[in-house]
Amino acid sequence: MAETRTVARTGVRRTPTTYVLRFVVAAYLFLLVAWPVSLVVVHTFEDGFTSLEGILSDPDVVTALWLTVRVAVIAVVINTVFGVGMSLLLVRQEFPGKRLLSALIDLPLSVSPIVVGLALVLVYGGRNGWLGPTLESAGFRVIFSTPGIVMATAFVALPLVIREVVPVLHEIGTEQEQAARSLGASSAQTFRRITLPAIKWAVVYGVVLSLARSLGEFGAVKVVSGNVLGQTRTATLVVEEKYLNFDQQGAYATAFLLAMVSVACIVIVAIIRPKEERR
Amino acid sequence: MTLFTRTPRVLLAGGLAAALLATAACGTGDSAASAGASGSTTLSIVGFAVPEAANKAIAAEFTKTPEGEGVTFKTSYGASGDQSRAVEAGLDADYVHFSVSSDVMRLVDAGLVDESWDDGDNKGVVSRSVVVFGVREGNPKNITSWDDLIEPGVEIVTPNPGSSGAARWNALAAYGQVIAGGGTEAEATDYLDKFFANVVSLPGSGRDATTSFLGGTGDVLMAYENEAILANQSGQGFDYVIPETTLLIENPGAVLKDADPKAREWLDFVLSDAGQRQFALTGFRPIRDDVDYGGTVEGANDPSDPFPAVPNLLTVEKDFGSWSELSAKYFDEENGIVTRAIIASGKAE
Amino acid sequence: MSTTNTLDRTSGVGLGIAMTWFSLLVLIPLSAVVFTAAGGGWDLFWRTVTGEQTAAAIRLTVGQAALVTVVNVVMGTLIAWVLVRDHFRGKALLEVLIDIPFALPTIVAGLVLLALYGKDSPLGIDVANQRSAVFLAFLFVTLPFVVRMVQPTLAELDKEVEEAAASLGASRVTTFRRVILPSIVPAITAGAALSFARGVSEYGSLVLLSGNLPFRTEVTSVRILSSIENNNLAGAAATATVLLVISLAVIVLLDVLQRRVSGRG
């Protein structure tokens, strides 16, 4: 029956709507993202590879790039562990204050970068902070040092993994997990064998988003890092500095590198993605 | 099937391992990494962005002198206000070089800089410039004086004095030139109202204002001569006009209270001819008129006469009192003269 | 509010650790801000946030963020739909584009948006120094949220229910409305909440484009920065606190909405 055939391949029917949707989406993404980003590429390669070479041969810039990568990875790992754990708690458990906590989790994203920096300095600042002086006398410096940068980065990307995973956890329901439990699996086994595979793409998207966000964060990091060349200057601060010194090409080249890392992540995700796409 | 389910976990594990390795291999950069050869000093310089190149050059010269031998530098550059707040919050610094005195006053109030920082001959000033008008190529609207700015139809771009201390020079110049020309305070306030009515963009910093102007906004840009010259040197410049009456921009430099003693010698070097020469080459006006910088500065309107004398040069000290006084009088968040002019212009639509 | 407690020992400890980190990173710093605002006294707080310029900035910020969220909900779902359900050459390219707004430092985002949609715009679309500049900048930085939230959920949907609906004679529109939409509404609202939150906090990419004109294109972040520059920390914290409260209200509202629509608790 024709009906069965079309039903079996839901989503592959080519109606005019399909083409309209494709066009609208492509046009939107082109105007909003592709075109502006292509400008970054154009400016970076205006003189061929010279600006990229200039950037990569400056040891201070390379240090900054490595610092950014280190900070981003640490922040993403922290946010992923926190994120997956918190998602499980929010969806699978009940406890007083759960709804409030869920709302509070989104809050970090709404805080202006200036205020993020301000808030962290108010608490962890070495001279006048609530906890800063105590920590510093114990030898642990937060603000104007790497831990502060990690915290600011983790702060701005906090909800991303959780918000990816929570809807999927809702969607997959608990039947499989309950079945596993009733068959004698421990919590850890259930998590590893049933839950994790089901949420893996949500986690992956969350990680990719968090990584991109962590790489690109500027305002909050600016306040907490102190921007010391060769030590606490991150890639986004390099971009600002180049910009302030009228080295626009250098700014574009550094931004290009950051964008490329995020592109690379998506490409990796696309590659390791299973062939389940071609249903 | 097993290979597939294992792959993400393997990748995750591999990724973590790589991250940890990277962290270990690249070191923790900021833990007491400043130890050089025994007996060497490290000076921490915190400054505003534009003199970065000049300071770097001066540092290179300094290390060639006997006082500066073996000295290494830790530097941090950014927007003046941000840098000042960072030092106040605990950023290590031996020497600071900011765009505007209020950024040093912040540190005096915090007890980090001695009150006598501006008692020397140079009054605490390390580099200078003047307020200028940036104009379109060929100056089509023929903007040369302050009165031209308030003509109807003239679109002004100026950095926002509300959110940037370094942007306040422009507003002060606009006000002060009326008084210097014999006007009353009422006339000056009136001028400011007309000035801000013509403002079409208030970007957050001088650099942003330049970008905005170069991006097509406005007919005239309120700029600093040194930024105009630096912009020209970097190929992203614009024509500029020095009005007959304008304000002298004085960038303060100070050594902190508990700084390394070498910092004093550094400051002396910066103030010496050798140091001032480097500032001149990047577009700043040296603090003395007799500094020899070779006579040519690329990027200026006339490279062989880069810092023409201004017929009527206003200064903060002479025409406005002290920075703390003028901060309250002109820029107070609710009652400042400039603040109110900006609000009035916003409500006028 | 539910007071049942299903926590066993493992999850109890897990919650404890998570809450400790959350407090150290978010709750304590944010309360420091609120505290600083309170430290200036109620009078200063009220004066600051009802001051004309600040109130106008807050209205602009919240208004534009809300508008952008609505657009994102529609376009984000559309984009996620095309990325998950449609297959065509070049789709991978679209996939790659989505996250770039995140990774681009806001200075550069501002520079390119100014170049393309400012005075020298090749397309002739000039939004520089107008409200639409704020709208555009917000749109740029919030793009990935709804898309990336809806994508995994859409991909996890059980096709059987859709097929059953179709075999019972439901049109595609009905299937979408009755079967698919309720399942992705939690993801959409999650993305919408984040989109609003992020829009409200955006600063770097719009400073160049918007011109910061008081009462017209000045956003709250600029007001906060002005207060800080004037060493008026209590005022800055006051404005920040108001924004926090508004964001929290919107987040909670969206959560309530989501429960109503999807019938999930």
Image: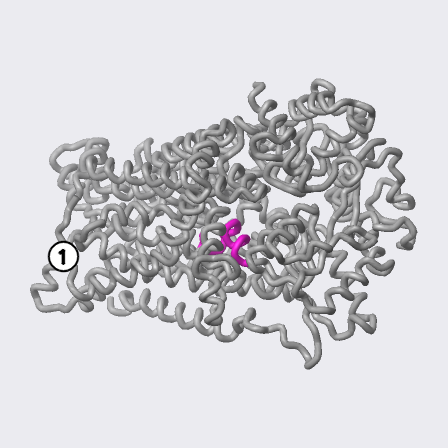
**Which chain's residue wears label 1?**
C
The residue that mark 1 highlights is C6
Classify residue C147 as left or right of residue B222: left
Instruction: Report x, y in % for residue B320.
Output: 74, 36
For image coordinates 60% across by 27% down, the residue present is B340
For image coordinates 46% across by 44% down, the residue present is A112
- The local crowd at label 1, few if under 14, some if 14 to 19, many if 20 or more residues have their Cα within 10 Å, is some
Count the labels in the image: 1
Above or below, A89 against C209 in this view is: below
Q: Nearer the viewer, residue C143 or A4?
A: C143
Location of the N terminus of chain B by quadrant is bottom left
Location of the C terminus of chain B by quadrant is top right
Instruction: Report x, y in % for residue B140.
Output: 79, 25
Q: Quadrant of residue C65?
A: top left
Instruction: Report x, y in % for residue C92.
Output: 41, 49
Q: Nearer the viewer, residue B20 or C220?
A: C220
For image coordinates 10% across by 60% down, the residue present is A179
Q: Quadrant of residue B318?
A: top right
Residue stretch rendered in magenta on the structure: A212-225
Per the picture, the main secondary structure of the magenta-coloured stretch is: helix
Kind of element beneath mark 1: loop
Residue C40 shown in magenta: no
- Is residue A247 visible to the viewer in this orientation of the structure? no
Instruction: Kindly identify the amino acid type of the residue bearing the numbered disc 1.
Output: Thr
- The colour scheme used to paint the residues is one colour
- Is residue A33 visible to the viewer in this orientation of the structure? yes
User: Outermost residue, left direction?
Assistant: A182
Classify residue B35 as left or right of residue A158: right
Instruction: Report x, y in % for residue A20.
Output: 37, 32
Q: Nearer the viewer, residue A33 or A192?
A: A192
